[in-house]
Image (cartoon, rainbow, N blue to C red):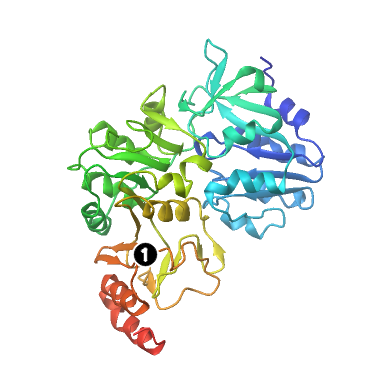
Amino acid sequence: MDVMPVEAALKRFVRDHAVVVTAMAASEPGGFFSGVHQVLQDCTGVVIWCANPSRSYEVFHDQSLDGRVELRPLFLTASVRDHQSQPHVHYVPQHLSQWVRNILFRCPKIDLFWGSCSVPDSRGFVSLGPGVCYEAELLRKAEHVVLEINPAIPFTHGATTVPLRMVSAFVERSGPLPESLWKQPDEEDQKIAAFVADLIQDGSTLQLGIGSIPDALTDALMNKKHLGIHTEMINNSIQKLIEAGVVDGSQKTIWPDKVVGSFAFGTAELYQFLDRNPVIELHPASVVVDPWRIGRNHRMVSVNSAVEIDMTGQVCSESIGHLELSGIGGAFDTHTGAQRSPDGRGIIALKSTTRQGVSKIVSELQPGAKVSISRNDLDTVVTEYGVAELKGRSVAARAEQLIAVAHPSFRDQLRYSARKNGYL
């Protein structure tokens, strides 16, 4: 087992014209991102694929790297979204289920995979821990593999284990993992969660997104029975439902009795909960969020959020006008996949207004807004004012449904616009 300092590994494996793939979210290799900008000063033509950067590392805003490196984030965070104006940072929009396929389409040869892993076990394996969205698949396509051993990385089950012989070099690194902190739900979140919970039957299988609404949904679901989890991301809300006995997976169609996801992102408590927990299995997003496979789950319910929704049902969940906020991730995959399931439902849950008091239900999307879910695929919308069921409805009926769940201050204006534009 070859263990070396991070600086030595960077100099050895990051070379001219290298294609590099890095692990994401809680598995982000902090040693790589903290030091790679220095090595890149002596390189040219390097491409780095990444996702969910937890910090504004120097490599994202060092203007001296223009022309030397191209960073291709697959999903943006608040830490780096402002760096899109840099000539060497280019967001790549694509559905989560297609990340691996599209990366390999553009870059058939991957020179280096750099990620994080658990402490090696006695049988000669490490675990990729809380993330295998694309990591497990692309690691096996790479010419060289470098993993940062971190005792904080849990040893997880599923497609996460890697034999030591597949790793070119290890780097020792300690410290806490990137976290997504629990958000205190407010009164509006709780109202939305109550409406969503009424749509979820006992025995349903759930996909939950991130944010205060899923956190509020935890309490709203405590009286449910035999729920299952088949989700893009496992978070603290799901942990609480498992510990309360609400989630047991006993009525799941695929992976019965298991909680299945592609990555976990939450607090240190969640990462400890994952460690050697046989109930949890992590598998690649090409498998977990494939819409056809999602649809095989009985009573599959997907809950995601959005930035704004127009009167005909176009959903924007990834930008404010031209400004990219995050990415499509698995929103389309899970929303459409759930509707293929017997008794399944795709739900978009959002507050009726922004923090600034602007309506999120609008007569038309902002110029430049990215359509994440088309009106042809939208199922159900929930705000603190109720439930709008849109699937199979006419444009006129959709407008009426959405106006009814908009904030009361905007309903007259929305109805006027709907009539002016010929929707009503």
User: Dot 1: within a 10 Å radius of its alpha carbon, few (fewer than 14), some, or many (20 or more) residues?
Assistant: few
Instruction: Please indicate, yes or no, whether residue 74 appears anywhere in the rendered image.
Output: yes
| Spot occupied by residue 370 in the image (x, y as percentages of width and height) | 53, 66
Q: Quadrant of the N terminus?
A: top right
Check the image and report above or below for 82 versus 424: above
Q: Quadrant of residue 174?
A: top right
The three-letter code of the residue at mark 1 reads Arg
- Say which residue label 1 marks: 355
Task: Count the marks.
Answer: 1
Left or right of 392, for residue 221:
left
Residue at horizontal 37 percent and vertical 66 percent from the top: 354
Question: Which is nearer the eye, 46 or 34?
Answer: 46
Left or right of 62, for residue 392:
left
Q: Residue furthest bottom?
A: 420
Residue at horizontal 50 percent and vertical 40 percent from the top: 287
Q: Quadrant of residue 17?
A: top right
Check the image and report above or below for 258 versus 172: below
* Element assignment for label 1: loop
Residue at horizontal 41 percent and vertical 55 percent from the top: 335
Q: Quadrant of the C terminus?
A: bottom left
Q: Residue furthest top?
A: 122
Left or right of 400, for residue 29:
right
Question: Which is nearer the eye, 98 or 329?
Answer: 98
Instruction: Please indicate, yes or no, whether residue 264 appears anywhere in the rendered image.
Output: no
Q: Quadrant of residue 189?
A: bottom left
Question: Which is nearer the eye, 360 or 176?
Answer: 360
Check the image and report above or below for 32 versus 55: above
| Spot occupied by residue 284 in the image (x, y as percentages of width and height) | 52, 37
Residue at horizontal 30 percent and vertical 34 percent from the top: 249
| Spot occupied by residue 25 in the image (x, y as percentages of width and height) | 51, 40
